[in-house]
Image (cartoon, rainbow, N blue to C red):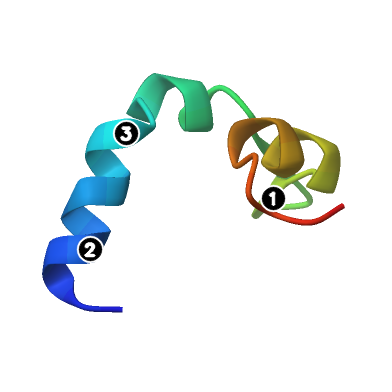
Amino acid sequence: MEKNERTIMTDIIPVESIASRIYLIRGVKVMLDRDLAETLPWVAG
């Protein structure tokens, strides 16, 4: 993935939408696959 593509993806999905779905479990930041699928609709579930 090129830098320009990464920038475009960041602009499409608000940071707040992703940040609110990141959990701290035993000192590790994780995102549940359910939340990831809802945030990124092109990810196959």
Of 40 and 16, which appears nearest the observer?
40
Of 17 and 28, which appears nearest the observer?
17
Image point (25%, 61%), residue name: 6
x%, y% of residue 35? 74, 34
Which amino acid type is marked by label 2?
Answer: Glu
x%, y% of residue 45? 87, 52
Q: Quadrant of residue 40?
A: top right
Position above or below: 21 against 3:
above
Alpha carbons under labels 3 and 1: distance apart:
21 Å
Position above or below: 12 against 43:
above
Q: Which residue is mark 1?
A: 30
Question: Quick check: marks 3 and 1 in contact, CB under 8 Å?
Answer: no
Residue at disc 3, secondary structure: helix
Alpha carbons under labels 1 and 2: distance apart:
24 Å
Sequence-first disc among 3 and 1? 3
Q: Quadrant of residue 4?
A: bottom left
Q: Which residue is mark 2?
A: 5
Which amino acid type is marked by label 3?
Answer: Ile
Q: Which mark is residue 7?
A: none
Which amino acid type is marked by label 1?
Answer: Val
Which residue, as the protein is rendered here, is positioned at the far left?
4
Image point (63%, 29%), residue name: 21
Residue at disc 1, secondary structure: strand
Q: Which residue is mark 3?
A: 12
Sequence-first disc among 3 and 2? 2
Badge 1: residue crowd in 10 Å (few <14, some 14–19, many ≥20) = few
Position above or below: 5 against 17:
below
